[in-house]
Image: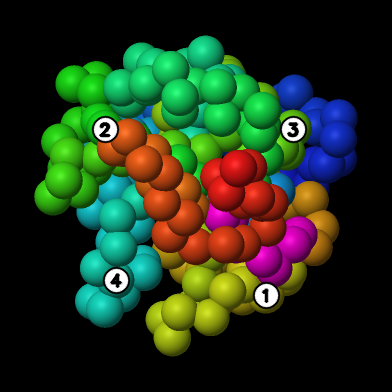
Amino acid sequence: MEVYELHPVTPQKRFITKAVEALRDGQTVIFPTDTFYGMGCSIYSKSAIERLIAIKGSGFDKLFSFIVPDLKDISTYARVSDYAYKKMKRLLPGPYTFILPAAREVPKRLWSKRKTVGIRVPDHSIVIELAQELGHPLVSTSTTNRKGDILTRPDEIEAVLGYAVDVMLSAGYVSNKPSSVIDLSTDEPVVIREGAGDVSIFCE
């Protein structure tokens, strides 16, 4: 694993570029977000997605979410109602995962059985710049060991996943609280998980 130490607010451009080159080559990258460290790849790299599944282990049965750099990018990859747009505009960027109907631009292997996808716009400059330079979404899943325990420290991540992941963008310790997950795929919002993001807006 190649490890690059980045400033969490003003990340060094050269390291972002190296990580983007790795993603375009079908490699896997670990990056900080506003919740956990994420482990991901390009949404268009089938082989890298299969590697992520293998790294997570045979018991991994959850769908990946993916990361876009800005609210305006979401409509390319998901169908967004007026209601969903207004709510997301108030909350993003932030520690939320929104479940939305998938658009055709998203490979079907990333769709749920309900033809939905989970989308994030994290409030963290490193992963946002990474997605911006890549030019399309990042598949993302939390960095865990085989037991499913979250890994939050770069040294711990390197020790556990260094054999399997190609690049890590390190920015020190990050939060150990997950994103809030809200299903906006129908007319009625459903809070699937209450995490780091305030969900009271959906109770108004």
What type is the residue that disc 2 sits on?
Pro
- Relative placement, left or right, of 53 versus 72 is left
Quarter of the image for the N terminus: give it: bottom right
Q: Which mark is residue 60?
A: 4
> Which residues make up the magenta segment?
174-180
> What's the distance in space between the residues labelled 2 and 3, CA to CA?
27 Å
Look at discs 2 and 3 and give the one toward the viewer. Answer: 2
Q: Element type at marker 3?
A: helix
Q: Earlier in the sequence, mark 2 or mark 1?
A: 2
Residues at badges 1 and 4 in contact (C-beta under 8 Å)? Answer: no
Q: Quadrant of the C terminus?
A: top right
The image's mark for residue 142 is none
Query: Label 3: which residue?
Result: 125
Q: CA distance from mark 2 to mark 1?
A: 36 Å
**Residue indicated by mark 2:** 101
Instruction: Say what secondary structure mark 4 lies in.
Output: loop
Between 30 and 90, the residue placed more toward the observer is 90
Reply yes or no: does residue 177 show up in magenta: yes
